[in-house]
Image (cartoon, rainbow, N blue to C red):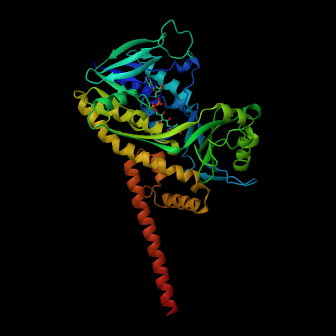
Amino acid sequence: MSKFVLIGSGLAGGLLAAYLGRRGYEVDLYERRADPREGNMVGGRSINLALSTRGIHALEQIGIADEVLKHAIPMRGRMIHPAGAGARTIFAPYDVDPNKHINSIGRAALNTTVIEAAQRYPNVRVHFNHKCTDVDLDSATANLLNSASPARTSSSQPLNSSTTQPITASGDAVIGVDGAFSAVRQSMQLKIDNFEYDESYLAHGYKELTIPPGPNASWRMEKEALHIWPRKSFMMIALPNPDGSFTCTLFWEFEGPRSFATTKTDDDVRRFFCEEFPDAVPLMPNLLDDFKNNLTGSLVTIRCAPWFYKDKVALVGDAAHAVVPFYGQGMNAAFEDCVVLDECLAEFAQDRQRAFTEYFARRKANADALADLALENFIEMRDKTASRTFRAKKKLDHFLEAALPGIYLPLYTMVTFTGIPYAEATRRARLQDRIMYGSLAALILALLAILVRAVA
Ligand SMILES: Cc1cc2nc3c(=O)[nH]c(=O)nc-3n(C[C@H](O)[C@H](O)[C@H](O)COP(=O)(O)OP(=O)(O)OC[C@H]3O[C@@H](n4cnc5c(N)ncnc54)[C@H](O)[C@@H]3O)c2cc1C
């Protein structure tokens, strides 16, 4: 049986190892961080995420969806917190069907669950504290620095030359599941002629803040909702956690007259939050410490091609297609990659290059479509959700979805609650909009014509 070397045991790495393990492949999974079960937070990314239909489907295939969903909190719609002191919140359901919801799930718990699912297969071995530096593509060999030597006594001890040992890991193929700043992809960039690569950063960064639990681990705002404070050029969101807390994320400009760059002192922070999020401030007793101590992350979109090299190397998840988080789909799409790659490897079991080629062909256009959708949704979330016209359009969407079941599906529904490929969902939504607006225009013209005739 072939042997795969996987680099990165984040969300997709663990799941892919489980899929490959189930097929009977030998799998060695290398992760630069310590074992998350040793209390090492999967830092640098969000604490919690929205898991939806595509991700759940991928977890179901490997039999761990129920285990994951046990820890999830359903979010049935957006709870909009308009600007201005005393403004009342507005709830906007995600779908006409109240049973359709997305799920708030802790990244660390999910990461642990997928790693444990992989480790149930005796042919899967997970090696923590191994950082990949580069990959020799032709021999499918990863060069790694092992910091798990006895000399390293603590998982928080930094990697340095005195505590790391170089090792190599060879297989029939190396798969880079090592996230947006993938070392595997960098090796492909150096080796493959005409490798296409594009990375673009938003002018906004993000910072995580906390609303702690209320008395008896209760939630201090509506629990089953994704809270949004839309403020036109920026916004804050909050997702519920099982312990009664909410994790808030402020998406704000890095630079500018009012921005992360100009908000330095406690007074600056307090003033900004009291002006913009007055209802949240009393719920955030640790605001000043959180703001000072938590990192400000950047938001990147990465597109590249191809996602494979011969039958030797392939990329999965953010390593192939990092997207900004505004559609809540990055992880869901990464999980969908695992399903498709697994299907392709089964379909072309004797020809791995063909399997990689098919996987890339089936996913690339969809990843590109998702990247665009995610960027567009930032404008929807931070600006449009506050507008009456936008909420009226959502209601019309839900009305048409109920009136024309199976024929009319709002874009959000297709992306979040179905497995319709992202590119097809985008095309279908554009067509629906053309028909809907065309029909409305025709109706208005017909009414005008009747009116003119009646007056004449
Ligand atoms: C603020 C924010 C909010 C988000 N919210 C959502 C959401 O609600 N829903 C959603 O679906 N998606 C969301 N995402 C996107 C989601 O986090 C990613 O799409 C997802 O984590 C991708 O999984 P991955 O396994 O490809 O990469 P990662 O989860 O980044 O995992 C990569 C792994 O590789 C390891 N690694 C990296 N380099 C090396 C190396 N050189 N050697 C060895 N190991 C290495 C890392 O330590 C890590 O464990 C969000 C992202 C952000 C930034």
Closest to the observer, 13 or 44: 44
Residue 37 spot, x, y in % from top left? 55, 19
Residue at 35 percent of width and 16 percent of height: 169
> Which residue is found at the position 71% from the left and 36% from the top?
287
The answer to whether residue 233 is left or right of residue 193 is right
Quadrant of residue 392 in the image? bottom right
The residue lying furthest to the left in this view is 350
Query: Within the image, what quadrant is residue 393 found in?
Result: bottom right
In this rendering, the count of numbered labels is 0
**Residue most extreme to the top:** 150
Left/right placement of residue 148 relative to residue 359 reads right
Residue name at image x 69 percent, y 52 percent = 89
Whole-percent x and y of residue 220? 73, 40
**Residue 95 visible, this angle:** no
Give the answer, above or below, for where 150 lies relative to 109: above
**Quarter containing the N terminus:** top left
Residue 452 percent location from the top left of the image: 49, 88
On the image, the x and y values in percent for residue 96 come to 54, 54
Q: Quadrant of residue 141?
A: top left
Residue 232 visible to the viewer: yes
Q: Nearer the viewer, residue 240 or 135?
A: 135
